[in-house]
Image (tube, helix red, strand yellow):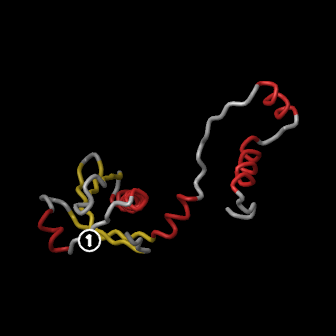
């Protein structure tokens, strides 16, 4: 599966007293909402970014987007269509550099000494992992 840099999918927005819900007919399960149309639009882009990133990571086939006329035929009464575009290189870079929380165990005496010397546990672990993996320290 080749990854694209840009994806564009039509979403359908439905307004109610509770806010604006968003769904992507071509991507079942890709749903979001916002209190206003503007918030819903921003949430739609974020949802599409995350959904497509996970699909890429899982090796799932990303479907070709339907045309507007096909999407409108799937729309329910009161829904409006919105074109949502995402730029995946930025999404991939952000996800790859995201910090991940890890829980680890060390002997109490080692923990006490490290705290006495004001060591940053995250920094020491990162440096040790890079050294063990042969990764250049300049890599982000």
Residue drawn at (34%, 55%), measured in percent from left and top?
36
Query: Picture quarter containing residue 15?
Result: bottom left
Q: Is residue 97 above or below residue 116?
A: below
Residue lying at 31% horizontally and 65% vertically, measured from the top left? 62
Q: Position of residue 72 (x, y in %)?
A: 15, 68
| Image side of residue 108 versus residue 55, left or right | right
> Residue 34 in the image: x percent, y percent?
35, 52
Q: Which residue is mark 1?
A: 65
* 11 shown above or below 130: below
Q: Would residue 47 be found to the left or right of residue 28 on screen?
A: right
In percent of width and height, residue 79 lies at: 19, 60
Say whether residue 52 is left or right of residue 82.
right
Q: How many marks?
A: 1
Q: Position of residue 125 (x, y in %)?
A: 72, 45
Check disc 1: other Cα within 10 Å, few if <14, some if 14-19, many if 20+.
some
Q: Quadrant of the N terminus?
A: bottom left
């Amino acid at each position: 599966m080749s990854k694209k840099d840009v994806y564009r999918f039509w979403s359908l927005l439905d307004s109610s007293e509770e806010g604006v819900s968003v769904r992507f007919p071509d991507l079942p399960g890709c749903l979001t909402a916002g209190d206003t149309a503007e918030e819903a639009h921003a949430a739609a882009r974020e949802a599409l970014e995350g959904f497509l990133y996970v699909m890429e990571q899982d090796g799932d086939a990303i479907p070709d987007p339907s045309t507007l006329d096909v999407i409108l035929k799937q729309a329910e009464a009161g829904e409006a269509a919105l074109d949502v575009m995402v730029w995946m290189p930025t999404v991939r870079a952000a996800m790859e550099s995201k910090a991940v929380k890890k829980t680890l165990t060390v002997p109490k005496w080692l923990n006490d000494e490290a705290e006495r010397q004001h060591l940053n546990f995250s920094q020491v672990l990162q440096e040790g992992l890079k050294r063990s993996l042969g990764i250049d320290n300049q890599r982000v």
